[in-house]
Structure formats: structure tokens, C-alpha cells
Image: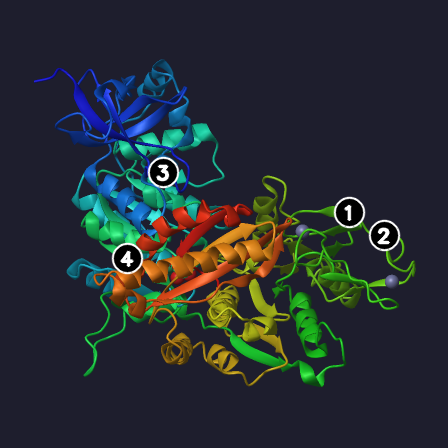
Amino acid sequence: MSAHHWIDVAVQTPAHSPIGGLLSYRSPFSVHLGQLVRVPLGKREVLGVVWALRDAAPAEMPESAVRDVLGVLEGLAPLDSAWRQLVQFSAQYYQRSLGEVALAALPPQLRDLTSEQLARRLKKQNPDRAVHTTPGPALSEEQDTVLAQMASGTGPFLLFGSTGSGKTEVYLQAVERMLATDPQAQALLMVPEINLTPQLEERVRARFGSEAVVSMHSGMTPAQRLKGWLAAHAGHARIVLGTRMAIFASMPHLKLIVVDEEHDPSYKQQEGARYSARDLAVYRGRLQNAPVLLASATPSLESWHHSRPADAEDLGGRYQRLLMPSRIGKALLPKVRRVDMNKQPRRAVLSTQLVAAIQERVERGEQCMLLLNRRGYAPVLHCADCGWKSECKHCSAFRVFHKIDRTLRCHHCGLTERVPRACPECGNADIAPIGRGTEQLEEHLGELLAHVLRPDGTPVRIARIDADSTRLKGALESQLAQVHAGEVDVLVGTQMIAKGHDFRRITLVAAINPDTALFSSDFRAPERLFALLMQAAGRAGRDAAQSATSEMWVQTFHPTHALFEALKKHDYPAFAASELAERTAADLPPISHQALLRADARTQEAAQGLLNAAREALEAQLSADPSTADLVLQVSVYSAVPMSMQRVADVERAQMLLESPSRMALQKMLWHLHSVLHQVRSQPENKGVIRWLVDVDPQAI
Ligand code: ADP
Ligand code: ZN
Ligand code: ZN
């Protein structure tokens, strides 16, 4: 027997590296699977995860070329097989290298610490696993039923519950019951964006004691992230509360996964490995035998479809659907009012009825919330004489006019310039904004409501919350706190304010201009709009005492559109049924499965050239081999087209869609595509290509 141990180690490698991120090393000491080690890579020393133990030296290279492991991270238990399998699956499914996914799933600081520094961190850990549970409220009948169904089933569960039906309370009680039955058990609670819901974090900490809970999200410092990760990995943290990245937390005793607002697009990572944390939650739950609870008032059509009940022709979906239709305390959902903008004066931003309704609410001391999905003052600046528009010279987009600092800003590449005094083309001094953003809406409201007084005789207070107003750290928190404290009467903002907040005093919510999403080229736009409007409506009348008079206003040029009809009845199932019928007729997800191949290049021709070359090579290769010829029939590969945002920061972007009724066939196709792309990319005619990437189950097309 040799005194050496031969091992394969996952290390950080470039995205599409052909070695897949596993490298062979020799270890002078014995190591375990999943152990964290330091290894040499080129001239550097890097962190790696022991991925496989070998019986003998790798045959592909001379023994003398195999380098030695430099050391083991002492004091850290190996990453368990479930974690490794999750990483392996993610890398494979989302078409990235194993090493990239594995290393991205670890806290960055782990790479840089010396053994002494790590030992010090480990010594500071608090191994107290006790949870201190403050009792929650007595459950409603619906909450009780849902928890009983969870206890007697295996899941995955889809909790379809109205806004304000007490879903959060269900999560907390489910966690509490599970922690009580097993002194080691851990729960993972996932939320779309933590900074939007600081209330939830407080609620969880107040319920279980701060010691038992760790947070994981991108707003944390590297030191905080390491500390939280270590606590979860050691099993000390009983509850991990986090955004999508938390799906990769090492939790050896994971026994429950909750995904709040499961429909939210921010569960999909938009760079690197483009994983869906919601989908991985379902995979991980099955892997670790942990029930998974997905929850929403407007579930994704995917989850809705997966939880369809069985009928005569259909065995039904594999998720169990749980229902909580009523709001807590018998609070009613707001009355939905549609304003036909065809009957308003041309160019009216706010209808006269809506302004009157806002005034009435303010005078009664109630709060209103106005949603407009465009920040800045106006989306375009325009010269009526020569037709000049404030285009961005680097992107296929207009620069937005921000009046506050008199700039034109590109929201895609960031290019910012002072507003010109006169038209840069013809010198006309009279250049004017077209369209409206939140900044202008705030200004406009200020004028319309200038004479309006609150019950105590003081003037109305208007505030705006969007990406501009919240740029500084802590700004969002303090602005939200003002709304909660009743220091704001009318709140204007983007969708940022529609999500999740438990505002108690808002009785009127209005969507100012939601129509654009009705006619978008993205087939998911209506689903997004419906979810957003239902969410927004859910911010009104959360206090039962005021719910009977609460209202959701929709200003639209298409008041009889089916989407608004369903919204008026708060009827998500009706909306979902009609959307699913359309998706079925058009063979779109969730009936079919999609992947996008994207290429970026200096020219559009080069970007499309790579994609089309890959497509031809792929079809030629597959058709030539009888064992793969079938795939060509099962997966449609469309021609390359420019992306809808065709140029960003001087980079031309093109995409190619792959679609199949079979997820498996699509996966096989992507596997073949991967190797084809490596060949095609290295051909001289594709030199101009900057990068390519694959997006599996893309959220936008
Ligand atoms: P959702 O997550 O469905 O929007 P929440 O869980 O936030 O709803 O509940 C809405 C409000 O009702 C919260 O203020 C919450 O504290 C309260 N609540 C939830 N469950 C109960 C209950 N069983 N008894 C009394 N109040 C409750
Ligand atoms: Zn001009
Ligand atoms: Zn730009």
C-alpha cells in the first residue's frame, strides 16, 4: 500500500472550464469526503472541497505531476453528502462547473483565513442550541387545518393563502413544532428580499430567541456571513433565515424548508449559475427528507400546476395544495375599482376620481399608496423640432430624466450626464420630458394636494420610496419606519413598496399605469402583473377595523381586460386557469420546459453567428448518431434573435431558445450543446464573441 491518498478536490475554476472544477491531488495524510482543504492551483493556494477518494493515482497524468494537498481546515466537520449532492445536481442542471458552484456556496472569508484565525472564530462560537419560544397567538381554524395537513402529509406543500391570512404565523408554528420534536433539528426559512421585510426577521427572532436564528443574505459583511455559516454548519443555529443564497447553507440537521412568496422572481439567480432557489428547495427537501412548504397569495403558475388536484383524466400534481382563503380577524380584501382612462382628459396622469378619493382619505387621517413602475422624473427627454431623444450611446435604451439633480441617467449601464441646456442636435432650447416616473408623480401630487389638510389641520405629507430614494444604507429602513409610524400620508413608489410589508394604516392603494404589462412580448408579464397587483391590494386594509372601506384602484385603458376582471374578484384561481389554458395551447411553461443560450459580442452578427453555428453543429452531430437522433425531434432549437434589450454598455446580445415537453430531453440536449459550444467558440470566425451562457428555466425571454 502506498502511504499516499489520492483524492479529487473541487476548486474554483472558470465558468465553462472543461475540467469541470475537479482536480486530482495527493495527500500525505488521510482525508474525508466533504472536508475543506487548501491546495495549490498554479502559483496560488486555494480552498477546495474533497469530492472523491481514489484507490490509485489518476491514470491521466504521471504520478510526479500530481501535487500535494497543503493542509486541512481543522475543526470543521466535513460537508455532508446531502450538501455535496445538492451542489453536484445544481452544477449539472444549470450547466456550470462543479467547482464554481461549490465554492460560491461557501462564505468568501473561508478562503482567506489562516488556520489560527479560523481557530479563533471557532472558539468564539456559542454551542447553545436552545430555542426560547415565546408563544404565538391562538390559531385560526384555517391555520390549524393547514398545520394538521402538514403533519399528516409528506409534501411538498403549496400553501395558497390570501394576503393577511396568517401564512407567516403558519411558518412560525410549523418551525416551532418541528424544533420541539427534535433537539437538533434545523429549519430553513427563505424570503425573496430580506431588506424589504425587516419586520419578518424581527418576528422570527422575537419568537425563537436571537441565539437560535442566523440570517444569510448579500447585505451582510464577510465576517457576519462566515459567523452565520459556521453556526448553521455546526448545527448551533436552529433556524436559518435567508434569501436565495441560503438554499446552499450547510445544515446537517435540516428538517423543514419554507419558501415565502414562492412566486417571486428574485428566487432566480441572474448571474453565474442561474439557479432557482425555489426549485432547489424542492430538490433539497426530497434529498434530506425534509418537508417543503411553498407559500404565496399568487403562486407561480409552475407551482399551481404542480399542485393541481387529480381528476378523471389526470393523476394530479405531485405537490399538495393547502388553502387559507380568509384574512385574519375577518378583515376583508379591498374593493377593486377600475378607472377607465379613455374617459379622462388626454395626458391625465391621475384621474379626478382618484385624486378626490386620496384627498378624502388624507382628511380622515388614513394612508394611501401609489404605485408606478418607473423611477426618475420622465423616461425620455425629447426635442419636438428635430425629433432628438435622450438615447444612451452605449445601450438600446433611453436615458431617464432625473429632475432632482438635473441629470440624464441610463438605468442599464449607469451613464450619467447633466441635462443639456438645449437640444444637442439642433440647439432648440425647448426640450421636454415625455412620460412619467415616480419623481414627477410625487411632484404632481404635491401640487394637486397642496390645499389638503390632515385631521389636525397640518398639511399633507407625501413621500417616495424607490431605488433612488433608498440608495444610502439604512435609508429604506428609516423610510419604511416613517410609514409605519404614520408620519406619511401618501406614499409613492415602485414595486418595492408593494411587497410583503404589514402596513397597518393604508386603506387605499392605486396602480397608476399598469397597462404596459398587458401587451408585453414576455409571456410571463401578465402573471407578474397579476401577482404585483394582488400583492399591492394586500397592503390595503390589513387592519380589520378599516378593511371594509379599503380600496385598490387601477387606472387603465382596458378596464374589461380579463386580468382586471379576475383581480376585481380577487380570483387567482380563475386567472391561473385562463393563463394555464393559454400556456397549454401555446406549449409554453409549465407545460413545456425552456432554456436560453445567450451570446455577447461586439457586433450582433458575431453574437448570433456563434449561436447559429452551435445549433447547426449540434443538429449535425446528433442526427449522425442513431442513439441521439431522437433528441433532435424532442427538443426544438430556434434561430438566434437579438435580445429585447439588444445592446447594453456597448455589448451586443443575442439569444437562442430551446424548448421541449421533456425536461430530461432538454437536459440531454444541453449536455451535448455544452461540448459543441467549446468547439465552435474556438473557431476563428467566432473570435469576436465575448462570452456565452446558458439559462435553464429562464424567467424572462
Ligand atoms: P400573511 O403572511 O398571510 O400576509 P401574516 O402572518 O403576516 O399574514 O398575518 C397577518 C396579521 O395577522 C399579522 O399582523 C399577524 O400578526 C396576525 N395574525 C396571524 N395569525 C394570527 C392569529 N392566529 N391570531 C391573531 N392574529 C394573527
Ligand atoms: Zn432638436
Ligand atoms: Zn446605457
Separation of disc 1 and disc 4 at Cα? 48 Å
Query: Which amino acid, by three-letter code, is at mark 2?
Result: Pro
Where is residue 257 drawn, in percent x and y? Answer: 28, 50
Q: Residue at x 35, y 26 (%)?
A: 47
What residue is disc 4 on? 668
| Of marks 1 and 4, the one in the foreground | 4
| Ligand 2 position by quadrant | bottom right
Q: Is residue 659 above or below residue 608?
A: below
Are the two marked residues, 2 and 4, in contact with CB atoms closer than 8 angstroms? no
Q: Do labels 2 and 1 touch, CB within 8 Å?
A: yes
Identify residue type, mark 3: Ala
Dot 3: few (<14), some (14–19), or many (≥20) neighbours within 10 Å? some
**200 versus 654 height, above or below:** above
Q: Does the CB distance between marks 3 and 4 fall below 8 Å? A: no
Query: Residue at label 2?
Result: 420
Please state the horizontal and vertical placement of residue 129, each as a whole percent of the image: 25, 33
Specify which label sits upstream in the sequence, 2 or 4: 2
Q: Could you say whether the residue bearing mark 4 is in a helix, strand or loop?
A: helix
Residue ID for mark 1: 417
Residue 252, position as x, y percentages in the image:
22, 38
Does 589 sit left or right of 360 as displayed? left
Give the labeled residue for mark 3. 105
Calculate the distance from the C-alpha at mark 3 to the C-alpha at mark 4.
25 Å
| Mark pair 2, 4: CA separation | 54 Å
Sequence-wise, the earlier of marks 1 and 4 is 1
